Amino acid sequence: MSTIEQTEQTALPTGTWQADTVHSGVTFEVPYAVATFSGEVTDFDAAIADGKLTGSARISSLVIKDENLKGHLLSPEFFDAERFPVVGFSAGDVHIEGNEVTLEGELTLKGITKPATLTGTITGPAIDHFGANRVGLALQTTIDRTEFDINWNMPLPNGEPALANDVTLKADLTLVEQA
């Protein structure tokens, strides 16, 4: 049995770190009717450099269970992917206590940039079985989609809106130190 050695973080690691997208994921969840609607973006990138985390995701890589619905989500009523193909995030203000992390930064969605606070956990750095130095970040934030001009909705028979305004964004990242 092997043991992975970790060091306790008080800041993002120094150097340059790039997302291992095979072992990472970017998802969203939003309450819809009586359940939760979720999706994933598969074409994304994230990096740590100079103590800052940056990330971007291509909206066209959205994965959901219904291709017709995907077309609606890519339309101007939602993401307007043709005019705004990329969602971006950058954070330079980082607070880490133990394995808890808070990142203060900016989220750009549909061409609108707003402050965003991501919270979660940091793991590592640790050397993997191939000798690569890795760090893990599990982050999330909740945004009001209407602040990013995503306003579509439809009333349910009881008069309540079908789609909630609050959307939870999640990024589970494995980043590998670059030589």
Image (spheres, helix red, strand yellow):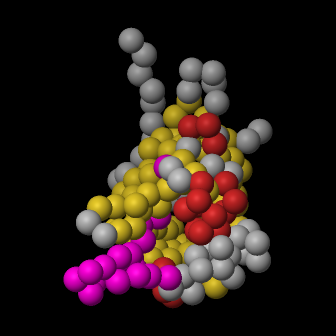
> Quadrant where the C terminus lies?
top right
- Residue at 56% x, 37% y: name it: 23
* Total numbered circles: 0
**Which residue of the protein is positioned furthest toward the front in this rendering?**
157
In the image as oriented, which residue stretches furthest toward the top? Answer: 1
Outermost residue toward the left? Answer: 158
Q: Is the magenta region chiefly helix, strand or loop?
A: loop
Foreground pick, 47 / 1: 47
Q: Position of residue 125 (x, y in %)?
A: 52, 41
Say which residue appears at 52% left-offset and 34% top-offset: 126
Residue 169 locus on image (x, y percent): 47, 64
Q: Quadrant of residue 91?
A: bottom right
Q: Is residue 165 left or right of residue 23?
A: left
x and y, in percent, of residue 27 in the image: 50, 56
In the rendered image, residue 169 lying in the magenta stretch gets the answer yes
- Front-most of 6 and 43? 43
| Relative side of 4 to 19, left or right | left
> Which quadrant would residue 90 be assigned to in this image?
bottom right
Visible residue check, residue 14: no
Magenta segment: 152-172
Task: Report whether residue 43 is seen.
Answer: yes
Specify the quadrant that holds the N terminus.
top left
The residue lying at 76 percent from left, 77 percent from top is: 83
Image point 44% across, 44% down: which residue?
A: 123
Q: Position of residue 149 (x, y in %)?
A: 57, 87
Horizontal side, residue 104 vs residue 178: left or right = left
